Amino acid sequence: MRAKSGIEIKTPEQIQAMRRAGLVVARTLRVLREAVKPGISTADLDELATREIRDAGATPSFLNYHGYPAVICTSPNEVIVHGIPRPDAILNEGDIVSIDCGAIVDGWHGDAAITVGVGEISPERVRLLEVCETALWQGLAQVRAGQRLTDISHSVEASVRAAGPYGIIEEYVGHGIGSAMHMDPPVPNYGRPGRGPKLREGMALAVEPMIVLGQPDTAVLEDDWTVVSVDGSAAAHFEHTAAITPDGPWVTTAEDGGEAGFAAIGQTGLSQAAAAQTAAARAAAGVG
Ligand code: MF3
Ligand code: CO
């Protein structure tokens, strides 16, 4: 079904399938986060992701998407998004690497990304990651029935701007998600609030701020995929998929449904909504 705005509306059953896909993504990213160490290659990470997703009985969504040649995107340092895993891309102490992962279960999608430090990283880079992840959760807190699309955009931007002079990437944005990975509407990470389609129950969005330590100008490398910052400054990218339930946002790609992430920004009402959804899903799946 579609809303007047053209945005896909999911049934509660379809959202449960998105949750199953989201959990595969969440668990895969957890394994990858733990695997990131000095000396590992980004191709090694891709191999681990392939195994996790296939062993879960899910399908990787990135592989062959518009000809994309791998299961995950791995984007070190000045690479913002869409870095291709390579055996000769070895991660070193002090690097940061963004890992983007998507999976499909029963035709329904989950999409999420994290940026991870390799060994010990500079305080400036620690902060970059924190600022980006906080902005993500501020955006996700707006994924609620009755809000408008750009309330998400505005919350992300305001959160970043309040933190310091970070560059917010404008050429790449979040998106609707459900029966396909990239659907309407685009979800920019900047802009005035109160614009765009009204959000309603059954919609699902991927929110994904990308920020850099320098200027937000981007370039695409010769491989036609790798997006870098023109000034070479380090980039962070965090992403989650969230579905709109009657109780609020259900972050399908967070293992706890979003509880800890919302609690970290002081949104305890939303974390209760996430907890209710998690409990309902566990009951439906027949687990304690
Ligand atoms: N998952 C990315 C996004 O967040 C897109 C990956 S593009 C692909 O929207 F080609 F690698 F699949
Ligand atoms: Co995405």
Image (cartoon, rainbow, N blue to C red):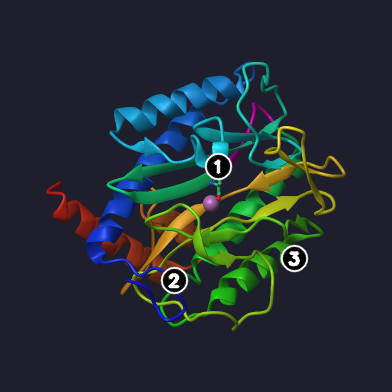
Asked if 171 appears above or below 144 in the picture, the reply is above
Tell me which segment is drawn in magenta.
114-120
Instruction: Give the camera-side residue of 180 and 212.
Output: 180
N-terminal of the two: label 1 or label 3? 1
Dots 1, 2 in contact, CB < 8 A: no
Dividing the picture into quadrants, the one containing residue 169 is bottom right
Which residue is depicted at the point 36% across and 37% down? 59
- Residue 7, label in figure: 2
Dividing the picture into quadrants, the one containing residue 84 is top right
User: Could you say whether the residue bearing mark 2 is in a helix, strand or loop?
Assistant: loop
Circle 1 sits on which residue?
66
- Residue 161, label in figure: 3
Viewport quadrant of the N terminus: bottom left
Labels 1, 2: front one: 1
Asked if 151 appears above or below 91 in the picture, the reply is below
Q: Is mark 1 within 8 Å of ligand 1?
A: yes
User: Could you say whether the residue bearing mark 1 is in a helix, strand or loop?
Assistant: helix
Instruction: Give the camera-side residue of 139 and 202.
Output: 202
- Horizontally, residue 231 falls left or right of residue 137, namely right
Which residue is depicted at the point 58% across and 65% down? 187
Q: Residue furthest right?
A: 231
Instruction: Give the camera-side residue of 211 and 219.
Output: 219
